[in-house]
Image (spheres, rainbow, N blue to C red):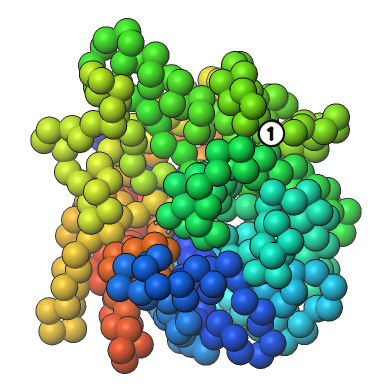
Amino acid sequence: MTAENYVFPRGFVWGAATAAYQIEGAWNLDGKGPSIWDTFSHTPGKITNDDTGDIACDHYHRFSEDFSLLKQIGIKAYRFSLSWPRIFPDGKGTVNWLGLDYYDRMVDSLLALNIEPFVTLYHWDLPQALQDKGGWGNRDLLGYFSDYAAVAVKRLGDRVKFWTTFNEPWVVAVLGNLTGEMAPGFKDRKLTAQVAHNLLVAHGMATQAIRSIEPDVQVGIVLNLSPVEAYTDDKYQKMAADRAWNATSAWFLDPLFKGCYPPGALKDLAADAPVVQPNDFALISQKLDYLGVNYYTRTVIGPQGEMKKVPGSEYTEMGWEVAPEALGRMLVKMNSDYRLPPIYITENGCALDDQVVGEHVHDTRRIKYVHDHLAELRKTMRLGVNIRGYFVWSLLDNFEWAHGYSKRFGMIYVDYPTQKRILKDSAYWYSKVITHNEVHR
Ligand code: FCB
């Protein structure tokens, strides 16, 4: 590629992302109710080292300091999530105004620094009170979620222009209800399919609720998408890869952008197929203003239909293959399979074994990771895919769900005992990328 190929269009959104439970702490302060992640992390044996998000990065008290760091790096947009039980301690009914005031102050602080807020309504921390009513398997939650969305948009929608209903519904459904590695920690195939469906309908209902209050804001959903590729050209490996893509990514993309499930998908689920109500697909497939794509790695299917480690490939601390070109291939395929709205890459990054040396963290591999994904994105944009922005995961090291604090994804290092922040080399590098609107190493 020539040097010019690394220059991004003017107005490209350079961002960083976090999520409430992973950074806020203050799990029971100022009227917040418990979430399923409080319950899950307080259950011994669920999280590496039995870590919890009780304190996390203490962002609840330190957001001003963290926003100064955003500004110092030059980040233009900040993607964060609201904690539903901070706003509705019981999930519905009485609003906790202190919780809403907190997000109000955050939004004002961001805007004062000229940083665009991108707000996610649901990044996994369901109010425990609603889990006690059956969680996402219970259709009543769809209405409660819309009510919560409406309250948040009434308060913040005059200033927040970008709203996301759900972060990664696949993870919520499958890792929460099938493998059980995430909250609420069930292993139930039928429930999983119903939860996945209900989340999509909830997305549609909330989209309507948001637009009825603030018709001009941008509404989208964020999906975790991972291309499934065959290790060789073998026909059966390719078929297995296609089936796996249909069962994961297309399971969400098809309803959203085609108004139905992938062909054969419901039949494959047989008795576990979800109950679908007549108007559901119309709700799910409403026009979206943008699609958020979280991309970390690809899945490779080997000769026995197994997930294969690729010899010679680099893997991160999560055991995920570094595969920037697969991101481009996936986006090009999606662009031909669907009529897509503009895309934001809402998460991309890597966990590394970062070490502090003096006052520095030399995370050269993270710089290369982000560089290579950005270069691939720039190339993909030239192929006609409409990508508007990029959010690095993550601004700060944080509570990485079932892995607790053992995985560090941040461009800013957090020393948890002292809560001291150290900008890693990647943060200084990203700052230059943003200033020049150009990716170079
Ligand atoms: C995504 C989540 C995010 C973070 C990264 C590593 O699945 O959305 O919260 O944990 O993975």
Q: Is residue 215 above or below residue 201?
A: below
From the viewer's perspective, is 265 left or right of 51? right
Residue lying at the far top of the rendered structure: 235
Residue lying at the far right of the rendered structure: 212
Please identify the quarter of the rendering in which residue 231 is found. top left
Q: Please tell me whether mark 1 sits on a helix, a strand or a loop.
A: loop
Please identify the quarter of the rendering in which residue 415 is found. bottom left
| Residue at 61% over, 38% down | 190
Q: Amino acid at mark 1?
A: Pro
Residue 118 shows in the view: no
Q: Which one is nearer the viewer's eye here, 186 or 58?
A: 186
Q: Give the quadrant of the N terminus.
A: top left
Q: Is residue 334 above or below residue 197?
A: above
Residue 255 shows in the view: yes
Q: Say few, some or many: other residues with alpha carbon within 10 Å of mark 1 (under 14 / 14 to 19 / 20 or more).
A: some
User: Could you tell me residue 242's position as x and y percent?
Assistant: 43, 19
Q: Which one is nearer the viewer's eye here, 92 or 82?
A: 92
From the viewer's perspective, is 344 left or right of 261? left
| Residue at 20% over, 35% down | 309
User: Could you tell me residue 30's position as x and y percent?
Assistant: 66, 90
From the viewer's perspective, is 263 left or right of 375? right
User: Could you tell me residue 28's position as x and y percent?
Assistant: 59, 86
User: Could you tell me residue 123's position as x and y percent?
Assistant: 57, 60
Q: Which one is nearer the viewer's eye here, 243 or 425?
A: 243
> Which quadrant of the picture is home to ligand 1?
bottom left
| Residue at 46% over, 27% down | 245
Residue bearing mark 1: 274
From the viewer's perspective, is 216 left or right of 376? right
| Residue at 30% over, 22% down | 305
